[in-house]
Image (tube, helix red, strand yellow):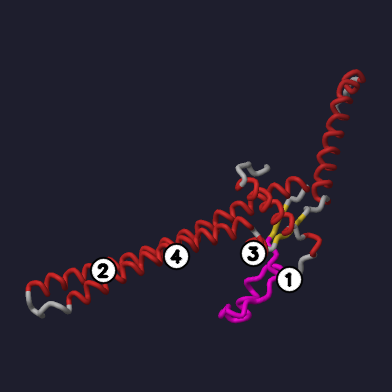
Amino acid sequence: MRFIPGHDRLRSLPMLTALVLCTGMVVAAAMQSATTPTTVAVVDLEVIYEKLDQHRAAEAKLNAMVDTLSEEGKRREADLKVVRIELESFEKGSQAFVDMQRKVEDAVGRLAAFEEFAQLKAQRESERLVKETYDEIKRTCSAIAKDRGIQLVLLDDATPQFAPEDRRPMMQQISARRSLFVDPALDITPLVVERMNREFAARGAGGSASP
């Protein structure tokens, strides 16, 4: 065993003490991290969408667009009806009849194309508005979580009843659920709705949403 002079041992003592302290701090931090519980909250997404002024306004905007497209479709149907009636006034096989028949076929094709366009446009606009609201919900949940020291916000799918119109087998509906029980005290749905409605009202009045 190699002999360490006394003065060398004295010099190494502070380093040993620092090492022990650092090790102790790391262990203590790890224990604290392991024992500190994660603060969890839940939201009912269906209720949020139902009570949001922003979502109701988006639905009204979508309905107005659908009504406009529907009126345009009716106008095109009326035009088609006119050319069909006009077609009947010509003698079959005549050049005028053939020319008018082409007009009818063109009108039918344009109407079909418009109906497909209108359906696709309404679907895409609906999806865009739902996604836009969903992004706002996520942002609001994040802000509330930071304010209240919440680390995790989950969707509460234990509360909603099974929808009668859902034609999937019952076991499949049950398997799609992730929560069996949620303590109502964890629910921040009212906070999310209140904050989003307040910010939406502020934007409508020319203000800006609070962070």
Q: What amino acid does circle 1 point to?
A: Leu
Q: Are marks 3 and 4 in contact (CB under 8 Å)?
A: no
Camera-side residue of 116 and 135: 116
Where is residue 125 shown, x and y percent of the image?
47, 59
Of labels 4 and 1, earlier in sequence is 4
The secondary structure type at the circle numbered 3 is helix
Q: Would you name the residue on which mark 1 appears?
A: 180
Within 10 Å of disc 4 (Cα), the crowding (few <14, some 14-19, many 20+) is: few
Please give left or right for residue 72 compared with residue 10 in the image: left
Q: CA distance from mark 3 to mark 2?
A: 40 Å
Q: Would you name the residue on which mark 2 appears?
A: 109
Q: Are marks 3 and 1 in contact (CB under 8 Å)?
A: no
Residue at the spot 76% in from the left edge and 50% down from the top edge: 150
Q: Would you name the residue on which mark 3 appears?
A: 50
Q: CA distance from mark 4 to mark 1?
A: 42 Å
Q: CA distance from mark 3 to mark 4?
A: 22 Å
Within 10 Å of disc 2 (Cα), the crowding (few <14, some 14-19, many 20+) is: few
Please give left or right for residue 117 compared with residue 39 in the image: left
Q: What amino acid does circle 3 point to?
A: Glu
Q: Which mark is residue 67?
A: 4
Q: Which mark is residue 81?
A: none
Quadrant location, the C terminus: top right
The secondary structure type at the circle numbered 4 is helix
Q: CA distance from mark 4 to mark 2?
A: 22 Å
